[in-house]
Structures are given as structure tokens and as C-alpha cells.
Image (spheres, rainbow, N blue to C red):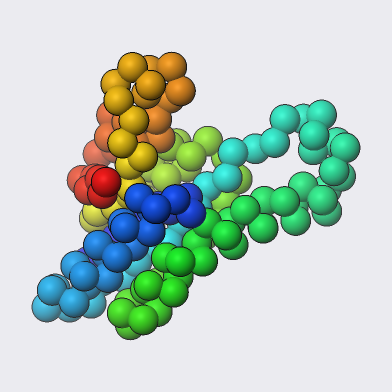
Amino acid sequence: MRILLAVDGSQSGNRAARYVAKLSSALAEKPHVTLINVDEPLMRSVSVELGVQGTARYHAENANYAVKTARSVLRKADVDFEEQMLVGNPADTIIKVAKSSRSQLIVMGSHGRNVLQSVFLGSVTIKVLAHSTIPVTIIR
């Protein structure tokens, strides 16, 4: 089984990693996991101010923070995984990577916002659920 685990460094994302580790131990064959973090692009003016190297460093630091706990959880559970740290629209990128990696399941955390908050703030989880043709498991 191929699982895409999308994390953002939040508690719900870390719970999703623990879910994948537990699921892995329950499966007859260990799954292959793609651990992904997608960082929103910076505003152009900020990118220009930081420069190419500064912008790259900013995104790398965000990604390393976001996957740190999930990476540790998966390693402790002896789960085979690869990491992808990308910059782009999170929902679109998660769906694109899930398709290209032939994932059979997307697992991600939800911050548990209510419907009204999600309408105004937007929700990566809602967008992935609405547009993915691959089954999605949401961990709260």
C-alpha cells in the first residue's frame, strides 16, 4: 500500500503520523509512505527582500520544522518513507503528489475549525476532500 502523509507541524498533523505508524503495524505488508509538507509561497515583495537563498532557507526551515515529529514517529515505527518538501498551493500540491506517487490513501490532520471559519479562512483539508479521487483519512 502507498500512503501519502501530509503534515504541517501541527498537533493534528503529528496525530496523523501516529495514525499511519499504527496502521502500518496492523497491515500484512508495510506500506510505503510519502511524507509531504507543502509551504505556501511567500509574497513576491518578501521573496525579493529575502533573495533567492533567503527564501529557500525560509522554506527549508519551515519544512524541517513541519516534518520533524512525523519523521521521528515513522522512524520509530520502522515505516518505509520518503520525504517531499515543496512550495505551492497546499491542497493542489497534495493531490498532485498523491496521484504522481500512485498513493492509495491520503492521511492528513484537521485543525477542527468549524464550517464558518473554514469558509472564511479556507481549509486545505476541505479542498483535498472535495477534489481528490484518492480516499482521504482525516485525523483530528
- Closer to us: 57 or 1: 57
For the question of whether residue 118 can be seen, the reply is: yes
Position of the N terminus, as image quadrant, is bottom left
Up-down relation of residue 114 to residue 124 (above or below): above
From the top left corner, tell me how far across and down residue 80 is, in percent.
36, 77
Q: State the residue at coordinates (57%, 45%).
A: 39
| In the image: residue 3, left or right of residue 100 | left
Judging depth in this view, the residue of 40 and 114 nearest the camera is 114
Q: Which image quadrant is residue 31 in?
A: bottom left
Q: Residue 47 in the image: x percent, y percent?
A: 79, 38
Count of numbered badges drawn on the protein: 0
From the viewer's perspective, is 34 left or right of 30? Answer: right
Q: Position of residue 36 (x, y in %)?
A: 46, 56
Name the residue at 24% across, 53% down: 105
Task: Residue at 57%, 51% (x, y): give it.
Answer: 86
Q: Nearer the viewer, residue 39 or 121?
A: 121
Residue 76 in percent (x, y) is at 36, 81
Residue at 48 percent of width and 54 percent of height: 9
